[in-house]
Amino acid sequence: MVNKIYYLASCDTCRKIIKSLPNADRLQFHDIRQNPITEQELEEMYQLSGSYEALFSKKAQLYKSMDLKNKTLTEADFKKYLLEHYTFLSRPVFIIDDKIYIGNGQKNIIEVIKALS
């Protein structure tokens, strides 16, 4: 399996994280705005994470503007929204050696750096 990063090129946080990575050349870069994630790619992430909700960003502006926080969302809903709009993906998402790392939390990024070192 190819090591990948799903990110947003226009996201300052993503760019800062990418700059800090050792051996970033070992990653296949996938800008989710230019090249939206496919259902197959989302399924791969789901298999590794065990949940669509784990991949879903509740910080997204769209989440607030669509008033989704006041709705009870199912796994099917999370999947639908993730496929509908790239902003719902909690970024960046790394898949390294068949392990998934979701989001930009410091602990997560430390784990990604270890995995790439």
Image (cartoon, rainbow, N blue to C red):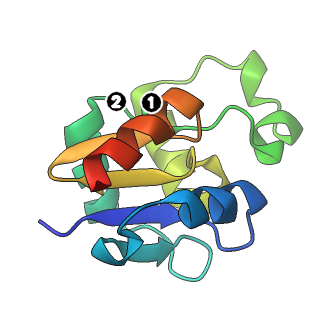
Which residue shows up at 49% across the image and 28% down it?
Answer: 107
**Quarter of image, res 50:** top left
- Label 1 crowding class (10 Å Cα cut-off): few <14, some 14-19, many 20+? some
Q: Pick whichever, 90 or 73, lies toward us.
A: 90
CB of mark 2 within 8 Å of CB of mark 1? yes
Three-letter amino acid code of the residue under disc 2: Ser
Image height check: is 17 above or below 115? below
State the SS at label 1.
helix
Give x and y (percent) for residue 77.
50, 36
Can residue 29 be seen here? The reply is: yes
Give x and y (percent) for residue 49.
29, 34
Circle 2 sits on which residue?
51
Can residue 85 be seen here? The reply is: no
> How many numbered marks does the figure carry?
2
Furthest residue toward bottom = 34
Q: Pick whichever, 86 or 27, lies toward us.
A: 27
